[in-house]
Image: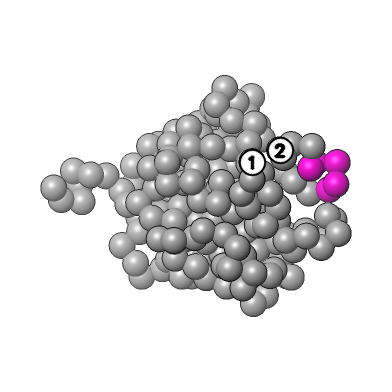
Amino acid sequence: MDRTDRGPVVVGLLLAAGGGRRLGGRPKALLEHRGRPLVEHAVRALRDGGCARVHVVLGAAAEEVRARADLAGCAVTVNPGWTQGMGSSLRAGLGALTGTDADAALVLLVDQPGIGPAAVARVRTACRSPSCLVAASYDGERGHPVLFGADRWADVVAGAVGDRGAREYLRRHRDAITFVECADVARLYDIDVPEDLKHLD
């Protein structure tokens, strides 16, 4: 079976570098949910959603995350500039994928455990080419995961600064986005402040 037959190669890109500053400095990747670290739940969502491979970007407490979490089979990049914000992790992740066989990167954030394999699969299957741009939507509002075709990576990286990540790129290219409604299969919330910990069990 050749590449055309099997469709684009979509790699899961998990951004898991955050230090949880508003959570008292608890690295988000290691927050526990159903007895395991959040990073494991996100990896499983990407795998079960059909991503060809999973690439994880770590930052805060990277060695502890590697020691405590099962990341077997994942490629791992450590972002030394993680304190600069999510944009630096997106740059690190897309940089690591550049030059590989990946046609697209499906980006998921580690602190959104309400997003599971069903939403990942919907966004992934909407990708048709290396120029695709796909985003989950929730009752018409753009959310995660977001998928960037490889032809777009250089422009995404160029604009990924601070905590904005790809927000500005997505705003400028809104007309090119294929939106995939996911409100019926996922819940969009972040674990950012102590009050959000109620979503974990």
Task: Give the quarter of the figure containing the C terminus.
Answer: top right
Is residue 64 shown left or right of residue 43?
right
Type of the residue with mark 1: Arg
Front-most of 162 and 108? 108
Front-most of 116 and 30? 30
Query: Residue 7 has which mark?
Result: none
- Labels 1 and 2 touching (C-beta < 8 A): yes
Is residue 13 shown left or right of residue 9?
right
Secondary structure under tag 1 reads: loop
Q: Residue at x 74, y 70 (%)?
A: 83
Magenta region, main secondary structure: helix
x and y, in percent, of residue 116 in the image: 54, 37
- Would residue 143 be counted in the magenta stretch? no
Q: Residue furthest front?
A: 35
Q: Residue at x 54, y 55 (%)?
A: 14
**In this picture, which residue range is highlighted in magenta?**
193-197
Front-most of 119 and 102? 119
